[in-house]
Structures are given as structure tokens and as C-alpha cells.
Image: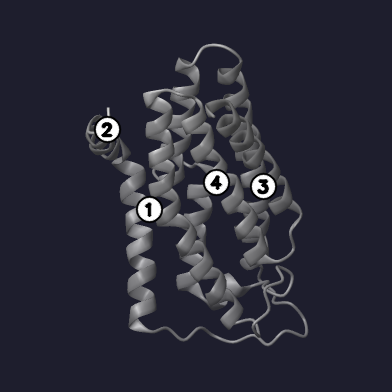
């Protein structure tokens, strides 16, 4: 069971990221990214250690704080780009919709694993768990983390480059964003949660450890 969880989790981390790299539809790109991110959960479980299980739990939290924010931002970009989801049609959308642009930037840094953002906590904990695990699983997990991280950077930064282009896509309706108070509150809360989690993730691990101890 643990072997299959580890193997399929590592495969999801890599192949989900590869699919996202070639995707031209922003929401589909985020969906393939989710496949890769769920892979982190199964690799953590598959390591068969407490540190690995902690990494899996941290990833569940980090994903909950990050991916809804990215999908909401994608919806915002569509709203100022005639409803299109194609990255080419969304050129400049981050400038036309600054709130969604800021949220997408935070989500991007989290997904890549930049320090002080949620995704860094997961990659740091999972790397520590892999280092403590002797044998082929350690090297396999570290390799999957490195490959997935590089691919994350490639497709998310490519999306950022398109979204913050100075020129919009020709032939696409370009509008300025209209915000509701609820939207701004939700995006602000998700940004704050992501940054707080990225800075104070060790405190979250202590809470998770106490919870896991109840099932020991």
C-alpha cells in the first residue's frame, strides 16, 4: 500500500507538471497543477514515516490556502478578457485586474516554493522527510521534488509573463475589473493565510503532531 502510494504520488508530481507545462488553457493548467500537488500528499504518506505524514498534512493545508485563490484569480482574468481562458487571450489581464494579479503572484510563489509562502513549507518538510528516509525512496522523492519544482517554475512564470504583458491580445474584449467587497475580502484573506502559513509553518507542524498522536 505505501509502495503504491509513493510510486503513484511521485508519478503525479512529475507528469501532472509536464501536462501543465504544455497547457494553453489557464484553468486546465491549474487543474493539472493540482494533480501534481496531490502527488506531494501521496509521496509524503508513501515514505512511511512521521515526517512524511507531517509533510502530507502540511500539503493539504497549503493547497487549501493556495489553489482556490489561483482559480478565483483565473476567473477574474476571464472577466476582463471577454470570458476567454486561453493564456494568449489573457495577455495583460493581471494589469487590468490588479487584485487577481496580486493573488496570482502570491499563488505562483507558493506553488514554486519561494520562502515565506505556503508551498515552501511543504517542500522543506517533504525534503527533510526524504533525507531522513534511507534507501532508494529518499533519492526518488528528492528527484521528484526537484523536477516538479523546476517544472512549476517554468509554467507558472510563463503564465505570469503572459498575464502581466504590457499589451493585450488583439481581438479580445479588454475591460477594467469591477470588484465586490466580498471578492476583495476573500482574496485578501487567502493571500494573508498563505503568507502566514509560509512564515509560521513550524507552529502548524506542532499542532498536526499532537493530532496524529491521538491516532498513534
Label 3: few (<14), some (14–19) or many (≥20) C-alpha neighbours in 10 Å: many
Q: Name the spot of residue 123 as percent of width and height, x first.
A: 48, 35
Task: Kindly report the distance in space between the C-alpha atoms of the residues bearing marks 4 and 1.
Answer: 15 Å
Label 2: few (<14), some (14–19) or many (≥20) C-alpha neighbours in 10 Å: few
According to the image, label 1 marks what residue?
194
Q: SS class of the residue under badge 4?
A: helix
Mark 4 touching mark 1, by CB under 8 A? no
Mark 2 touching mark 1, by CB under 8 A? no
Q: Name the spot of residue 27 as percent of width and height, x first.
A: 63, 66
Q: How many marks?
A: 4
Q: Earlier in the sequence, mark 3 or mark 4?
A: 3
According to the image, label 2 marks what residue?
215
Tell me the residue at 39%/77% (across/down): 183
According to the image, label 4 marks what residue?
37
Task: Kindly report the distance in space between the C-alpha atoms of the residues bearing marks 3 and 2.
Answer: 32 Å
Mark 3 touching mark 4, by CB under 8 A? yes
Task: Kindly report the distance in space between the C-alpha atoms of the residues bearing marks 1 and 3.
Answer: 22 Å
Horizontal side, residue 9 vs residue 193: left or right: right
Q: Name the spot of residue 131 as percent of width and height, x first.
A: 49, 18
Q: Earlier in the sequence, mark 2 or mark 1?
A: 1
Is 155 rendered above or below residue 215?
below
Task: Kindly report the distance in space between the C-alpha atoms of the residues bearing marks 2 and 4.
Answer: 25 Å
In depth, the one of 170 and 20 nearer the eye is: 20
Q: Nearer the viewer, mark 2 or mark 1?
A: 2
Q: Earlier in the sequence, mark 3 or mark 2?
A: 3
Tell me the residue at 70%/43% (across/down): 15
Q: Nearer the viewer, mark 2 or mark 4?
A: 2
Q: Nearer the viewer, mark 3 or mark 2?
A: 2
Q: Earlier in the sequence, mark 4 or mark 1?
A: 4
Residue 44 in view here: yes
Q: Residue 16 — which label?
A: 3
Q: Earlier in the sequence, mark 2 or mark 4?
A: 4
Amino acid at each position: 500500500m505505501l509502495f503504491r502510494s509513493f510510486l503513484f504520488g511521485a508519478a503525479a508530481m512529475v507528469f501532472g507538471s509536464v501536462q501543465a507545462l504544455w497547457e494553453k488553457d489557464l484553468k486546465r493548467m491549474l487543474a493539472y497543477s493540482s494533480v501534481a500537488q496531490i502527488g506531494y500528499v501521496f509521496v509524503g504518506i508513501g515514505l512511511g514515516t512521521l515526517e512524511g505524514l507531517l509533510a502530507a498534512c502540511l500539503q493539504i493545508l497549503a493547497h487549501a490556502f493556495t489553489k482556490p485563490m489561483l482559480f478565483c484569480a483565473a476567473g477574474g482574468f476571464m472577466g476582463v478578457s471577454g470570458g476567454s481562458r486561453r493564456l494568449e487571450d489573457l495577455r495583460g489581464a493581471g494589469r487590468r485586474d490588479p487584485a487577481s494579479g496580486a493573488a496570482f503572484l502570491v499563488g505562483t510563489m507558493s506553488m514554486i516554493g519561494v520562502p515565506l509562502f505556503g508551498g515552501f513549507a511543504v517542500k522543506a518538510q517533504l525534503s527533510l522527510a526524504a533525507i531522513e528516509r534511507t534507501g532508494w525512496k529518499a533519492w526518488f522523492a528528492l528527484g521528484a521534488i526537484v523536477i516538479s519544482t523546476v517544472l512549476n517554475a517554468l509554467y507558472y512564470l510563463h503564465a505570469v509573463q503572459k498575464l502581466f504583458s504590457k499589451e493585450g491580445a488583439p481581438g479580445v474584449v479588454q475591460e477594467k475589473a469591477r470588484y465586490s467587497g466580498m471578492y476583495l475580502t476573500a482574496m485578501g484573506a487567502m493571500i494573508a493565510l498563505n503568507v502566514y502559513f509560509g512564515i509560521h509553518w513550524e507552529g502548524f507542524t506542532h499542532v498536526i503532531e499532537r493530532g496524529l498522536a491521538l491516532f498513534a
